[in-house]
Amino acid sequence: MLEGLDGAGKSTQCRELKKVFRTPPVPLFTHQPSGAGVIGEMVHSLANENSGLVPLAIQLLHLASHAQHYESEILPWLAGAGVVMDRCWWSTVAYGYFGGGLGDTMAPEEFEKLAMLPARGRRPDFTFVLPVSDPLNLADVSAGYEWLLARYQESSIAVPRLAIEETTDFIIRVLLSKHLVDR
């Protein structure tokens, strides 16, 4: 899984990795949508209309969209070639809980359990958190990613700031060292 703040290069790395993993079995390269599909479009519309929804209600609606995406797109691929995701429930925790002001609603561990529901509690085999040069005043969201990196030290890494090709090489080296790919 590729994670990080907006502008970190997750989509770029998905494209670069797609070039590397072209021979069967080819993994599914996907993005956890915030506004895709019927449910996602409704959630995106409600959130952008400033409808007066409280932050927890918005996050629960996002989870409904994520559940639909997991069931229809991601879970069927997990038995086959695997999945490379541009965002997952980590972003829900970082942006939704830490950046969404839910600290007075519940503990981060409780929200994490909610965020994992669409994935049926599945954790990624490995998570790469990509850096950004300008975090755009997202200190709370960054703190969320730091919290997750600390919780999942054995299955995640903060990627150092590198050029695009060097970042791709770094990710592939880690995947090979963890025996998650054989190329």
Image: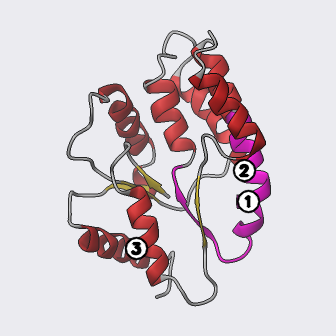
Q: Residue at x 45, y 48 (%)?
A: 152
Residue wearing tag 3: 16
Do the residues under discs 1 and 3 have CB atoms within 8 angstroms? no
The number of discs equals 3
Question: Label 3: how many residues lie within 10 Å, few (<14), some (14-19) or many (20+)?
Answer: some
Note whether 161 is above or below 140 in the view shown.
below
Magenta stretch contains residue 71: yes
Judge from the rendering whether residue 60 lies leftward or rightward of residue 86; answer left or right: right
| Label 1 secondary element | helix
Mark 1 is on which residue type? Glu
Note whether 10 is above or below 25 in the view shown.
above
Do the residues under discs 1 and 2 have CB atoms within 8 angstroms? yes
Spatial CA span between label 1 and label 2 = 5 Å
Judge from the rendering whether residue 153 lies leftward or rightward of residue 123; answer left or right: left
Nearer to us in this view, 86 or 45: 45
Q: Residue at x 26, y 47 (%)?
A: 132
Residue 111 in sight:
yes
Nearer to us in this view, 112 or 71: 71
Name which quarter of the figure residue 23 lies in: bottom right
Q: Residue at x 74, y 43 (%)?
A: 67
Magenta stretch contains residue 115: no
| Label 3 secondary element | helix
Residue wearing tag 2: 69
Q: Is most of the magenta stretch helix, strand or loop?
A: helix
Residue wearing tag 1: 73
Q: Position of residue 74 (x, y in %)?
A: 70, 60
Spatial CA span between label 1 and label 3 = 21 Å
Question: Label 2: how many residues lie within 10 Å, few (<14), some (14-19) or many (20+)?
Answer: many
Q: Earlier in the sequence, mark 2 or mark 3?
A: 3
Mark 2 is on which residue type? His
